[in-house]
Amino acid sequence: MEIILSIAIGVMTTCGVWLLLRPRTYQVIVGLSMLSYAVNLFIFGVGGVKTNVPPLLGDDVVTSSLADPVPQALVLTAIVIGFATTALFLVVLLASRGLTGTDHVDGRGDRK
């Protein structure tokens, strides 16, 4: 399970960086979102990936076998903040496109 999570984090990070290097602002916003999702997965994975363990405490459950709830709370907070930041970026994108008439990062039109 850890290798799948590591591969997913690596692929999302690679795609996010590639999209950050694109010339259009929408692609940059999607790249930033993918990077934030990759960081969220990383933080979630640091808390421990546990399988076949009940999520509730009982008399026969050892507390060391449970996942740490702090990274889960941090990831939930980061998802909410990331959603708000993406909404702000989209508003800035629309305002920039309205003022300049193009959606390129440097403000120039299509190059030939």
Image (tube, rainbow, N blue to C red):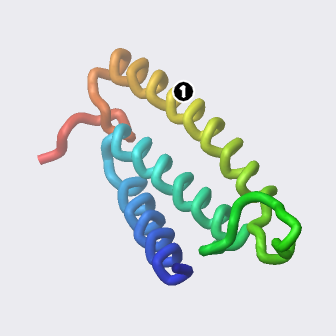
Q: Quadrant of residue 98?
A: top left
Q: Nearer the viewer, residue 34 or 27?
A: 34
Task: Find residue 7 and report its horizontal and vertical position in percent.
Answer: 45, 77
Residue 38 vs 89, above or below: the answer is below
Residue 103 vs 71, above or below: the answer is above
Q: Is residue 56 left or right of residue 9?
A: right
Task: Residue at 74% x, 50% y: name it.
Answer: 74
Q: Residues within 10 Å of mark 1 (few under 14, many from 20)?
A: few
Task: Residue at 46% x, 77% y: name it.
Answer: 4
Q: Residue furthest front?
A: 59
Task: Find residue 58 and report its horizontal and vertical position in percent.
Answer: 83, 63
SS at circle 1: helix
Q: Quadrant of residue 63?
A: bottom right
Q: Quadrant of residue 12?
A: bottom left
Image label count: 1
Q: Nearer the viewer, residue 112 or 24?
A: 24
Residue 33 vs 71, above or below: the answer is above
Q: Give, as a three-letter code, the residue at label 1.
A: Leu
Task: Residue at 42% x, 54% y: name it.
Answer: 20
Q: Is residue 81 left or right of residue 12?
A: right
Q: Which residue is mark 1?
A: 88
Task: Find residue 14 and report its horizontal and vertical position in percent.
Answer: 42, 68
Residue 36 vs 81, above or below: the answer is below
Q: Is residue 81 left or right of residue 35?
A: right
Q: Residue furthest bottom?
A: 3
Task: Residue at 32% x, 47% y: name it.
Answer: 23
